[in-house]
Image: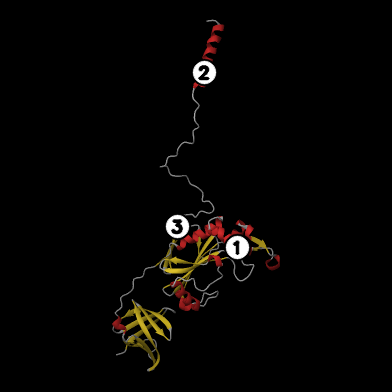
Amino acid sequence: MDKKNIFILVGLVVVAGLIVILAMPPKEHEGPEPSNQNEAPSAVPIKEGQVKQVMKTYKGDGISFQYPDSVDLGESKQGDYLLNVKVEKISSLAGTMGYDKVTAEKNTKLLEGGQYGDNVDWPFEASKKVARIDKVNAQDFVVFSRFEVCSVVFERTAYFFHEGNQFIITLSVPKDLMISRFPQYFKVDKTNCGDGYVWDFDKQEEFYKLARNGELGMASDWLQTFDSIIKTIKFDVVEKKVVDSSLIFGRWQSLDDYNSEIEFNEWKKFDYYQGAKVSEGSFSLDGSKLIVTEDGEKMEYEILEISNSKVVLSYLARGNTLSYKRVE
C-alpha cells in the first residue's frame, strides 16, 4: 500500500471516531460519591458556640451533678469557664449582698411557693427567673457588674436551699476574655475608670438577649453550659435512721456539766440548771433528727446514739456533740 492510501485510511478512521463521539448523548453531571453511612465520622473541631460533651462528675456537699471537661472546678482562675460551689448552714449565715440568715429563711419559704424572693448579689433584672433543681426551686440569675460603673463580671448563679443548707453554684468567665470577643458592647470611661474597657450599659440588654437566644458565640456557650449543668443536679438520698421515740422521753444529765439537765415529756423539752428550769420548748422527731422549737427559734439536732441509759446529740448549727445519761 502506497503512502497516499495510508493517509486516506488514517483520515477515515479519525472521521469515524469523531462521528461516534458526536453521536453519544451528553453525560449528566455527577455529584460526589455517596458516603458510607457506616463509617465513623472524622474528627471535627469544636467550634465556638458548641458545648464539648465530655462530661465529668461532681459529688460532695450533699449533691452531685455533671459538668463538661471544658469547665474548671473551684478557684483555679485558669480556664475559660470557672465553676464554684459553695454550701453553708442557713443557721450560721452572716454574709453580705443578701447572703445572710434572715434573707435565706425568707427566700426558702418564697421559693417553696414558686416566688423568686428577695434579691441577693447584683442580678441583671432581665435574667432573673425561678429554676427547678431536683426537688426544689432556685433563683437563677446573671451578674454583669457590682457596686459601681467600672465593674465588669460575667457570672451566672443558681441559689437554692435544701435540708437546712444554702447552695450557691456559679459559672463565670474571665472578663478580659469576654471583652476581647465582644468589644462592641464596651467603652472607655476615662473620667471614672481610666483606660480600661467598661460596660456600655445601653447595650447590656442587647448583649443578654442575643446570648440567651444562642446568637453570641462564647457568651451563648457560657449560658448554655450552665443550663446543661443545673439540669443534672441531684440531692444525695440519705436513709433516715429509725429511732425508738419512746427512748427519748425522760430526764437526762449532761456528761460534760452535771449541773445541766434536759427533760423530754409529752413532746415538750425542758432545760434545767442546778435544778431550776431555765427554758422550755416543743420538740418533734424526723428519723434520727430531733427538732426543738423555743420562742419561735428552731434548733436541729442529730441523734447519734440512743439507748435506755445514754443519748448522744449533735447540734447541727455548730457541729458540737452533747452527751447525756439518764437520770434514775
**Front residue of 87 and 296:** 296
The amino acid pointed to by label 3 is: Met
Tell me which label, 2 or 3, sits earlier in the chain.
Answer: 2
As drawn, the label of residue 204 is: 1
- Judge the density around disc 1: few (<14), some (14-19), many (≥20) Cα neighbours within 10 Å: some
Tell me which label, 1 or 2, sits earlier in the chain.
Answer: 2
Image coordinates for residue 31, horizontal then vertical, percent: 49, 35
The amino acid pointed to by label 1 is: Gln
Residue drawn where x is 45% and y is 57% of the image: 55
Image coordinates for residue 52, horizontal then vertical, percent: 49, 54
Residue drawn where x is 49% and y is 61% of the image: 226
- Judge the density around disc 2: few (<14), some (14-19), many (≥20) Cα neighbours within 10 Å: few
The amino acid pointed to by label 2 is: Ile
Q: Give the labeled residue for mark 2.
A: 19
Residue at the limit of the structure toward the top, as seen here: 2
Left or right placement of residue 165 versus residue 184 in this view: left
Residue 102 appearing in the image: yes
Tell me which label, 1 or 3, sits earlier in the chain.
Answer: 3
Mark 3 secondary-structure assignment: strand
Total number of numbered discs in the rendering? 3
Alpha carbon separation for disc pair 1 and 2: 73 Å
Q: Give the labeled residue for mark 3.
A: 55
Residues marked 1 and 3 touching at CB (< 8 Å): no
Does residue 195 lie above or below 107 as drawn? above
